[in-house]
Image: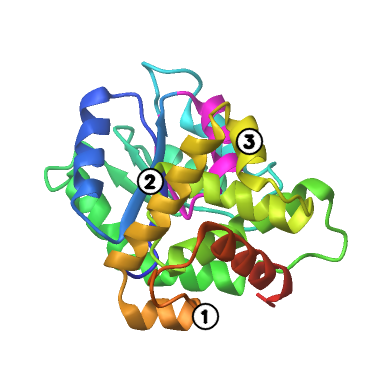
Amino acid sequence: MSRQLTVLLVEDDKDICQRFSAEIDDTEEISLVNTTNDSLHALELVEEYIPDAIILDLDLSNGRGNGFEFLKDLKELTLPVNPYVLVTTNISSSTTQNFAKDLGADFIFYKHQTEYSEKKAIDFLKMIRPLIFSNRHQNNLSAPSAETPVQKNQRLRRLISIELDSVGINPKSVGYKYLIEAIFIAITDMQTNIPALVANRFGKTAASVERGMQNAISRAWHTTDINELMFHYTAKIDPDRGIPTLMEFIYYFANKVENKEY
């Protein structure tokens, strides 16, 4: 499975959210990382997930804040790379359109148009998915000369997520976020009891965290094309197991992210 486009949905209509979620569930190219109707919470989610794209409702009348505030504040965030912003709105004035684009909206869909649907919006993201990835690569995920500790941590987590996507670890699986944290710890803290540290950070038991991570790896090794796996994971694997052990996997990608030039 090729890398999925990660999407954050900022929308206050529950029915629309359900339709978007259903459309995304039906495609392998896109993964929904989270949904919120709160523009302030959306900013926190952007910093947490650093999504490839955002589907943004401008109004948010049934939530908190609005899309304009979100776009304005999004420009103030220090991110390793900016997400693609797809606006969906019932507001169709040219003034609104120009203002949204000035604030950073990349494309606008008008909900009132007869041909509009959540499926059309998702199909559009699927179509431009290679372009989004290409632009993000050109923006360069390597560390800037004056990188702050916060910027470095954001960059490392983003690079880890790219590596997990490359071997087909499903972003929707519970083990995905655990693996990001585990690999991050292996890079930055040099700790040995990594599952216990991850469990402590998420308020879970070490056994459940370890199980979630290993299950995510196992599913990837049973569903991802073998050529993709062999290209992105070059370490030796015990033939009797057929898949990497948890710690082999964590330290392999910790070393890869730490030493790879992006």
* Vertical relation: 197 (above or below) 66: below
Q: Quadrant of the N terminus?
A: bottom left
Report the Cα–Cα distance between label 3 and label 2: 30 Å
Q: Identify the residue position indicated by label 3 in the image.
A: 73
Q: Quadrant of the C terminus?
A: bottom right
Q: Identify the residue position indicated by label 1 in the image.
A: 236
Report the Cα–Cα distance between label 3 and label 1: 46 Å
The residue under label 2 is which amino acid type? Ser
Q: Are marks 3 and 2 in contact (CB under 8 Å)?
A: no
Q: Residue at x 68, y 43 (%)?
A: 77
As for residue 178 lying within the magenta part, the answer is no
Where is residue 86 drawn, in percent x and y? 39, 49
* Label 2 environment density (alpha carbons within 10 Å; few <14, some 14–19, many ≥20): some
Q: Residue furthest right?
A: 146
In screen coordinates, is 232 left or right of 247? left
Where is residue 112 drawn, in percent x and y? 20, 36
**Magenta-tinted stretch:** 38-58
Q: Identify the residue position indicated by label 2 in the image.
A: 173
Where is residue 210 drawn, in percent x and y? 50, 44
The residue under label 1 is which amino acid type? Lys
Q: Nearer the viewer, residue 164 or 143?
A: 164
Q: Residue at x 77, y 46 (%)?
A: 150
Report the Cα–Cα distance between label 1 and label 2: 25 Å
N-terminal of the pair, mark 1 or mark 2, is: 2
Q: Residue furthest left?
A: 114
* Label 1 environment density (alpha carbons within 10 Å; few <14, some 14–19, many ≥20): few
The residue under label 3 is which amino acid type? Asp
Q: Residue at x 44, y 39 (%)?
A: 95
As for residue 57 lying within the magenta part, the answer is yes
